[in-house]
Image (cartoon, rainbow, N blue to C red):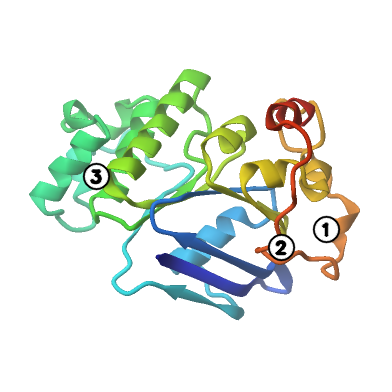
Amino acid sequence: MTLLSVDHLCVRYGAHEVLHDVSLSVERGEIVTIVGPNGSGKTTLLRAIVGAVAPYAGTLTRAAHLRLGYVPQRLHIAPTLPLTVERFLNLPKSAPKPQLQEALVRTKTTALAKSQISDLSGGQLQRVLLARALIVQPNILLLDEPTAGLDQPGAAEFYQLIDTLRRDTGCAVLMISHELHVVMAASDRVICLNGHVCCHGTPEHVSSAPEYRALFGTGTQGALALYRHEHDHSHSHTHSPHDHHHAHGHPIAQKEEAGL
């Protein structure tokens, strides 16, 4: 079942076009990960999906009664502001108690309910943000680089939690990530974005695509290349989001070549 369909989406900030002709879909229960360099429009795409940014062209089609849960990349709260986790989860209006308790249990944050937000570690704060997204019992979880700033064990634990939530609740996940090794291991589909969709498909297909390798290079150890390849200076070669690039050789060998 298709929960969300994005068709030929274009977004501008003033005269600057951030997204051009972007199309994608999200099916029930799958994990779709968006990768791309800084400035490629990844966060703008999520903001357009939740309605925070208005496209100037294209359409967004949501399934009837679709519920979205959004986990931002970071949250800025003044350290002197007295705000407990429980109070934060009840903003801007009180959440139904059963949903609130379920969200705390699922994210293993029940013991943090009375803690001050300013006292939380990075990993604890991310789980609280995830709990807040779960209160609406979403059909799709939208995550904007949810492990940015976490150490490797913390990131691994968070991704495991996301996979467990997907399995237990049946929600879909649309996630931005810069951790390529995780993307290739945990995603059902990958979208490589650089203002437009460069390539799209299963992790194995995308990792062997020349557009992906031009962006991510080799031996990057999961870091994004800082340059834009020539393909992305022209929209005349934009690939359909349904184009699949067929992998050649062994997937593990491909990941090693890509520095994953």
Tell me the amino acid under the disc marked 1: Asp
Give the mark nearest the N terminus, 2 or 1.
2
Q: Residue furthest front?
A: 249
Q: Nearer the viewer, residue 91 or 130?
A: 130
Would residue 18 be found to the left or right of residue 141 on screen? right
Q: Nearer the viewer, residue 136 or 186?
A: 186
Foreground tag (3 vs 1): 1
Residue in the image at 78% along x and 66% along y:
238
Which percent across, then down, holds residue 109? 23, 31
Label 3, on which residue?
88
Residue in the image at 58% along x and 60% along y:
44
State which quarter of the image contains the N terminus: bottom left
Tell me the amino acid under the disc marked 3: Phe
Which percent across, then down, holds residue 207? 72, 41
Q: Secondary structure under badge 2? A: loop
Label 1, on which residue?
232
